[in-house]
Image (spheres, helix red, strand yellow):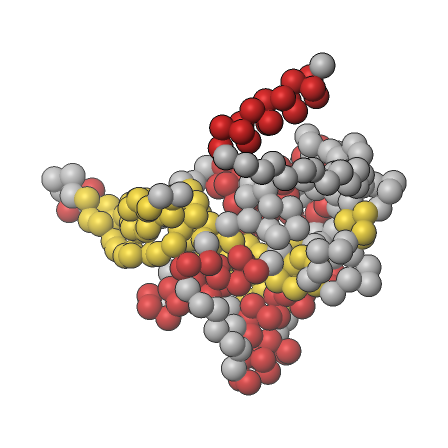
């Protein structure tokens, strides 16, 4: 089973600075880590490789220093890393990012499964994974908490020469009040939640292998993407203004029996309206 994991390098701290001219994150001088949800995606991919064989390719889009995230993924058991890196990709929103990553995945060749974390800790949109599946025109299942089974289904149309084998996967998808079991054909894309596993600690051998691993860099020249769909130019959503909300003035605590509290609250609302 050939698996591709999409990861993102994010700031380790929530105290990030914003470039006032571009309204984008200023990452200089801020320590970066692999997006926490992506750690579960890496771990699940490695577990699937251990069960079914194949290889795990990890891909990320970011500046040159994002290769550190790829090396960490390799230390956990991934086989190879690909860095999508070009100034032309700078400022991409989730749509342009998913378009660019989908183009890079096509460049990698045939695959059975793409796994992403459910969302990134710095954006919290949960849009890139589904966006990739849309650009690649493959099924997607979000918020996956368990992969139950992966099998080959043989469909016979009456003649042996017409028999076709289809790879299927059955997963549990987390809902607000329970879960649902979904079966999908492969290739497909999954986004996973933290309940799916516990990421492993890299072994010494894994760390040594990651240190010497070759990271392949994919630029706009190699991918040859539509320049109108990448970077700021290809981003239909743009940040126009970033500001710190005015601190809220402390309220008041209403005391008494419930009927009295309700009356006080109604009076306060009426005074506010008037």
The residue positioned 40% from the left and 43% from the top of the image is 176
Q: Would residue 213 be found to the left or right of residue 239 on screen?
A: left
Counting from the top left corner in percent of width and height, residue 101 is at 59, 47
Given the current orientation, which residue lies at the most extreme left position? 158
Quadrant in which the N terminus is drawn? bottom left
Residue in view at x 33 percent, y 68 percent: 51
Q: Quadrant of the C terminus?
A: top right
Percent across and percent down for residue 218 are 66, 55
* Up-down relation of residue 71 to residue 180 (above or below): below
Q: Is residue 210 left or right of residue 162?
A: right
Q: Is residue 150 left or right of residue 30?
A: left
In this view, the residue farthest toward the bottom is 204
Please, is residue 35 above or below residue 255 in the view?
Answer: below
User: Can the viewer see residue 173 in this picture?
Assistant: yes
Q: Count of labels shown? A: 0
Q: Position of residue 128 (x, y in %)?
A: 57, 43
In front: 189, or 102? 189
* Occupied quadrant, residue 196: bottom left
> What residue lies at 69% left-to-right and 19% top-to-bottom?
271
The residue at 49%/28% (across/down) is: 259
């Amino acid at each position: 089973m050939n698996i591709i994991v999409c990861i993102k390098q994010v700031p380790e701290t929530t105290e990030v600075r914003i470039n006032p001219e571009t309204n984008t994150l200023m990452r200089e001088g801020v320590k970066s880590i692999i997006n926490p949800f992506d750690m579960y995606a890496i771990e699940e991919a490695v577990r699937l490789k251990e069960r079914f064989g194949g290889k795990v390719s990890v891909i990320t889009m970011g500046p040159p220093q994002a290769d550190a995230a790829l090396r960490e993924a390799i230390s956990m058991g991934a086989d190879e890393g690909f860095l999508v890196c070009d100034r032309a990709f700078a400022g991409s929103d989730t749509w342009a990012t998913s378009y660019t990553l989908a183009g890079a995945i096509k460049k990698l060749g045939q695959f059975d499964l793409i796994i992403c974390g459910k969302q990134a800790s710095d954006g919290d949109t949960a849009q890139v994974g589904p966006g990739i599946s849309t650009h690649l025109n493959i099924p997607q299942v979000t918020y996956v908490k368990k992969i139950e089974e992966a099998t080959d289904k043989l469909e016979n149309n009456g003649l042996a020469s017409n028999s076709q084998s289809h790879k299927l996967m059955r997963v549990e998808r987390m809902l607000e009040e329970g879960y649902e079991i979904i079966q999908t054909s492969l290739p497909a894309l999954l986004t996973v939640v933290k309940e799916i596993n516990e990421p492993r600690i890299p072994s010494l051998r894994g760390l040594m292998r990651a240190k010497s691993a070759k990271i392949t860099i994919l630029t706009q020249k190699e991918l040859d993407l539509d320049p109108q769909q990448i970077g700021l130019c290809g981003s239909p959503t743009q940040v126009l203004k970033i500001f710190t909300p005015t601190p809220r003035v402390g309220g008041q605590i209403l005391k008494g029996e419930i009927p009295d509290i309700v009356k006080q609250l109604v009076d306060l609302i009426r005074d506010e309206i008037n």
